[in-house]
Image (spheres, coloured by chain):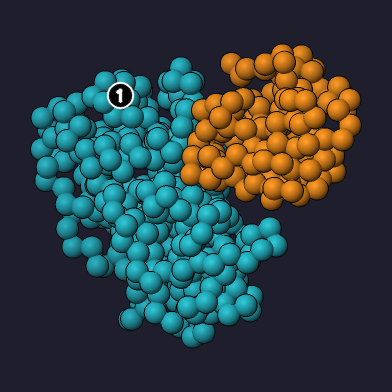
Chain colours: A cyan, B orange
Amino acid sequence: MGKKTPLFEKHESLGAKMADFSGWDMPIHYGSQIEEHHAVRQGAGVFDVSHMTVVELHGTDGMAYLDRLLANDIGRLKSSGQAMYSAMLSETGGVLDDLIVYATGDPYLVVVNFATRGKDLAWMRQVAEGYECEVVERPEFAILAVQGPGAIEKVKSVVGEEKVALIEGLKVFQGGWCDGWFIARTGYTGEQGVEIILPEDQAVSFWDSLLEAGIRPIGLGARDTLRLEAGMNLYGNDMDESVTPLESYMANTVVLEGRDFIGADALRKQTEHDELVGLVMLGKGILRAHYPVFSNDAPVGEITSGAFSPTLGKSIALARVSATSSNMTVGIRGKMQAVECVNPPFVRNGKQVYKLRKT
Amino acid sequence: MAEFPTELRYLKSHEWVKQEGDMVVVGISDHAQDALGDVVYVELPEVAAECQAGDEIAVVESVKAASDIYAPIAGTVVEVNAMLEDSPELVNEKPYADGWFFKIRISDSAAVEGLLTAEQYQALCEAEEH
């Protein structure tokens, strides 16, 4: 038996198919993953992502510490509560994890992946030595992501006035505290929505009120196809310690100029590298992780994430390749299948947005 | 609860088999479609293809994974379910009816008797879940 979020019994009573996620019993779907996917693109859905790890950085050196820890530049954040997506790198530039940090001042709020929790916390504490900064895990929170074009209005209909005012004052990619809840306009779907970190003893009643407001529960299966359509990486699939952010379509989250973060020197030296690109299947069939990718019939890499895209009605993938061309194929069970090479994202706000990659 | 129609025979690899004279109709069980999740693509065999029992002759792709479909009995593929091309969800919706995969003309009609009964197959599925 794995770890259970405060909503475990809710998932069971909704008939969820549960599966192990790095030691947590989490809902994969509540009947149909594809219907759940469409519900988020067209209306509103709620995900229990309480398995993710919330960390606070206490102390006066928080900003200096983050400037050293992260490939992205914490100094770029100007407004309070602004969110930043970044990789945390090893000395050799490998991606230890990707995370979101909220510029809440002291303490800073950071959300990291649970699968890498132990490694992340050990690393973050090691780097914190010499800084007036304490890395404090906050496991007593639940996390709910409410996503979709109707998500924000529906959330506002079930929270009190103060929280409504907070939400209305937030810009995209910004969050703030209210009454022990942290609400941020962030997500992992490519839709409008909020992510809410709240005390675990309030999770069940809030979940119930969201469902009563017509928000549909969404499993982690649809979360994966939504994030893939949105061109967002999944740690462990699309990147890990063996690759740098430059090889992971994360160059826009790396700020090298004038900075001395861990891994910066390695990135400066990496002038030639593979790239993470998007693939769209032209015919029928499903692209899946580890399928080999070819350019002009020469092997150039492999798929890191692949799935059927419910929004586009065809298969899409992310692939790490050494070269691209207008003649790209993927080997599926020994047969070469034609694909288009594109720049992610594939879908934003319910619409197809990908562009053919120039070669 | 998954259904296990008693008039069908089954394979432990989760195909169902229905005898129609010298032909068998093959699909995947309700238990299998439920475990796979939404089916998004089915790769069917060529009509007139010869197969031996145990050959991988089709592939069912769900949101979760690609799974091989095995020929239950030796024979010749005589028809495939063209509806699955545009409506793979039929495999989830009607696994024992419109969601069938292909038909095989078999030379040994007694071979069907050697497959699992509904009761045997159900017991196997229940054992798998524990």
At which x and y percent is residue A120?
51, 53
Name the residue: 77% across, 25% down: B21
Chain at numbered mark 1: A
Q: Nearer the viewer, residue B11 or B81?
A: B81
Name the residue: 72% across, 14% down: B6
Q: Say which quarter of the image contains residue B120.
A: top right
Name the residue: 60% across, 73% down: A294
For this view, does A196 lie left or right of residue B5? Answer: left
At which x and y percent is residue A140?
41, 32
- The relative height of residue B93 versus residue A278 in the rendered view (above or below) is above
At which x and y percent is residue A278?
45, 65
Q: Is residue A225 visible?
A: yes
For this view, does B17 lie left or right of residue A109? Answer: right
For this view, does A158 lie left or right of residue A274? Answer: left
Of the 4 image quadrants, the one containing the N terminus of chain A is: top right
At which x and y percent is residue A199?
33, 29
Q: Say which quarter of the image contains residue A149.
A: top left
Q: Is residue A27 visible?
A: no
Residue hosting label 1: A211
Q: Nearer the viewer, residue A122 or B61?
A: B61
Which amino acid, mark 1? Leu
Name the residue: 62% across, 17% down: B3
